[in-house]
Image: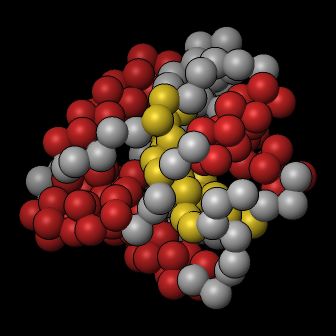
Amino acid sequence: MKSGFFTISGCSGGGKSSLLSALAARGFDIVAEPGLRLIRSGGPKPWEDMLGFLQRTAALARQDLEQAASLRGAVFFDRGLIDALSGLVKLGDLPAERELPKAIRRYRAVFFAPPWREIFEQNEFRRHDFKSAELESKHLLATLRAHGCEPILLPKFRLDLRCEYLLARIQNL
């Protein structure tokens, strides 16, 4: 298996966390989504303070990257720095705009989980609707592409097949 950092980006409700759990069950190192960790720890919530939420999420994601530097093998990130920076870019944050290309280069590959209506669920941490998830996805894809990143789109396969697809793609990088 190729080593390095890989991120699974995309909107809420695209199956990223389930895929990361499947990778962890196979023995891979994973880094949980910083935004969700922030919400659960009582930090700013995106529905109350989007700017504060994204700034703190980006800071947490930077720490995650530094801490993961000591890990060997393939390390998979659930969202992370490029997702937070993309959100800040949407809000007009110029430092995030300048940092994004460098952040993208920290990953060997960016996988992208598109919106998936059949598995999308609202909950206490995901308060937005599916239409908002689709808009988030379009913005994130456009922002990544505008900054020189062509994400690898994840097919809407059954979880075990999606995991196999991702691992096979990594072998061919």
In the drawing, does residue 133 fall left or right of residue 103?
right
- Residue 152, compared with residue 103, is above or below; it is above
In the drawing, does residue 145 fall left or right of residue 127?
left
In the drawing, does residue 38 fall left or right of residue 62?
right
- Residue 27, compared with residue 152, is above or below; it is below
Place of residue 93 in the rendered image (x, y in percent of width and height, measured from the top left): 15, 61
Q: Which residue is drawn at 76% across and 34% down?
A: 164
- Residue 63 visible within the image: yes
Place of residue 151 in the rendered image (x, y in percent of width and height, measured from the top left): 40, 39
**Nearer to the camera, 8 or 136:** 8
- Please name the colour scheme applied to the rendered image: secondary structure
- Residue 21, compared with residue 94, is above or below; it is above
Location of the N terminus by quadrant is bottom right
- Residue 17 visible within the image: no
Furthest-front residue in this view: 172
Place of residue 157 in the rendered image (x, y in percent of width and height, measured from the top left): 71, 19
Residue 55 in which image quadrant: bottom left
Q: Which residue is drawn at 53% across and 53% down?
A: 7
Place of residue 160 in the rendered image (x, y in percent of width and height, measured from the top left): 83, 30
**Nearer to the camera, 113 or 124:** 113
**Nearer to the camera, 66 or 153:** 153
**Nearer to the camera, 84 or 157:** 157
Q: Which residue is drawn at 66% across and 25% down?
A: 121
Residue 33 in which image quadrant: bottom right
Q: Residue at x 24, y 34 (%)?
A: 142
Count the labels in the image.
0
Furthest-top residue in this view: 118
